[in-house]
Structures are given as structure tokens and as C-alpha cells.
Image: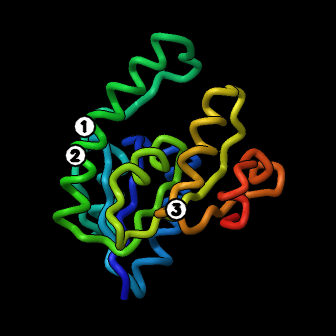
């Protein structure tokens, strides 16, 4: 039995969160799960119904389509907050695995993982921004990132870092 910490960055339920809940339903059979979520909402209600514990992390929402300096500043600010709260959660929960179902969750999980914690990234996005791709390629090559699961070859082909490629 492994302790798995799942870092979901949205409190509402959309396609990605539905997928994360389906993964959680499978994983909870033989593992101990705990979620990191931004706030109470649709997702927390689903977790309560499934008897899966969670920790509130505060707002982690990047506005869609926000790029440039304003987007970078907001991401940097959210990253500092996520690193502080995430490291605290990792220290308290002591997971074996951090499961990151999204791009921000990958960055924050890789930053917060201790030397014993493995990070698994479930990649299901197409990224338009070159800066975002560079950031994700950098963090996906991190030593703590052990596996990158992608929904298709096309999505996986975005990760070109030679240290990350064998993890796909």
C-alpha cells in the first residue's frame, strides 16, 4: 500500500477533474489517498462522498489565456504560495507518490517532493506557449519525476528534454 498525494489545482469539476476522480477510484482500492485542492466546491463534495481526505491550498487558478508579464507574475506568486503550503503538506502526509494531473501541479509537485517521493505526471494538455513548454520540459526532467503518462503520442511529443523522454 502506497500513500499517494494527488494535487488538483481546480475546485470545479471539468474533464480533467473527472479523469482524476476516476483514477482516484481505481487507486484507492489498494492505496491511501489524500488530495491537495484549492477550496471547497464541487471537487471537495465528490471527495467527501468517496471518503477521501483533502487539504485546502487556497486559490491556484490561472486565468485562461493570460500570458505575458501579468501571467508570469501571477504564476510566480502562486508558485511561491504552492511551494510553502505544498512542502508543509508533503512533510505532514509523507506520501510515496505525488500524482500531478496538470501542468502547474507538475511544477509544484516537483518543487515540493522530498528525496523519497516520486512524482507521476498525467499529461493531457496541448501547450501553445513556448515558455510554458520550456518550463514543463525543465521540470519533467527533474530527478523526482519518475513517470509521465500521456493521453496520446501527440501530447507526449511535446516533452523533448532528453532526461524526460525515457520517463514517458
The first of marks 3 and 2 along the sequence is 2
Which type of secondary structure does the marked residue at label 1 adopt? loop
- The alpha-carbon separation of the residues under discs 1 and 2 comes to 9 Å
Mark nearer the viewer, 3 or 2:
3
Residue 32 position within the rendered picture, expressed as x and y whole percent measured from the top left: 32, 78
- Residues packed near mark 2 inside 10 Å, few (<14), some (14 to 19) or many (20 plus): some
Which type of secondary structure does the marked residue at label 2 adopt? helix
- The alpha-carbon separation of the residues under discs 3 and 2 comes to 20 Å
The first of marks 3 and 1 along the sequence is 1
Q: Give me the residue at 40% from left, 53% from top.
A: 109
Which quadrant of the view contains residue 62?
top left
Mark nearer the viewer, 1 or 2:
2
Q: Are marks 1 and 2 in contact (CB under 8 Å)?
A: yes
- The alpha-carbon separation of the residues under discs 3 and 1 comes to 24 Å
Residue 9 position within the rendered picture, expressed as x and y whole percent measured from the top left: 41, 43
Instruction: Looking at this view, name the residue that lies furthest to the top.
Output: 69
Residue 24 position within the rendered picture, expressed as x and y whole percent measured from the top left: 45, 69
The quadrant the C terminus occupies is: bottom right
Which quadrant of the view contains residue 92?
bottom left
Badge 2 is on which residue? 85
The quadrant the N terminus occupies is: bottom left
Badge 3 is on which residue? 145
- Residues packed near mark 1 inside 10 Å, few (<14), some (14 to 19) or many (20 plus): some
Q: Give me the residue at 52% from left, 54% from top.
A: 101
Badge 1 is on which residue? 58
Q: Image height check: is 48 above or below 69?
A: below
Q: Image height check: is 114 above or below 68?
A: below
Amino acid at each position: 500500500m502506497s500513500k499517494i498525494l494527488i494535487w488538483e489545482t481546480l475546485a470545479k469539476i471539468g474533464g480533467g477533474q473527472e479523469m482524476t476522480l476516476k483514477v482516484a477510484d481505481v487507486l484507492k482500492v489498494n492505496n491511501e489517498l489524500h488530495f491537495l485542492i484549492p477550496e471547497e466546491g464541487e471537487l471537495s463534495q465528490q471527495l467527501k462522498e468517496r471518503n477521501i481526505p483533502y487539504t485546502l491550498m487556497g486559490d491556484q487558478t490561472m486565468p485562461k489565456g493570460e500570458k505575458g508579464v501579468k501571467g508570469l507574475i501571477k504564476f510566480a506568486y502562486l508558485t511561491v504560495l504552492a511551494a510553502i503550503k505544498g512542502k508543509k503538506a508533503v512533510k505532514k502526509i509523507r506520501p510515496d507518490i505525488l500524482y500531478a494531473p496538470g501542468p502547474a501541479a507538475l511544477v509544484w509537485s516537483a518543487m515540493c517532493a522530498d528525496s523519497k517521493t516520486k512524482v507521476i505526471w498525467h499529461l493531457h494538455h496541448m501547450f501553445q506557449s513556448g515558455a510554458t513548454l520550456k518550463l514543463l520540459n525543465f521540470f519533467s526532467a527533474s530527478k523526482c519525476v519518475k513517470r509521465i503518462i500521456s493521453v496520446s503520442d501527440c501530447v507526449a511529443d511535446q516533452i523533448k528534454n532528453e532526461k524526460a523522454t525515457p520517463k514517458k
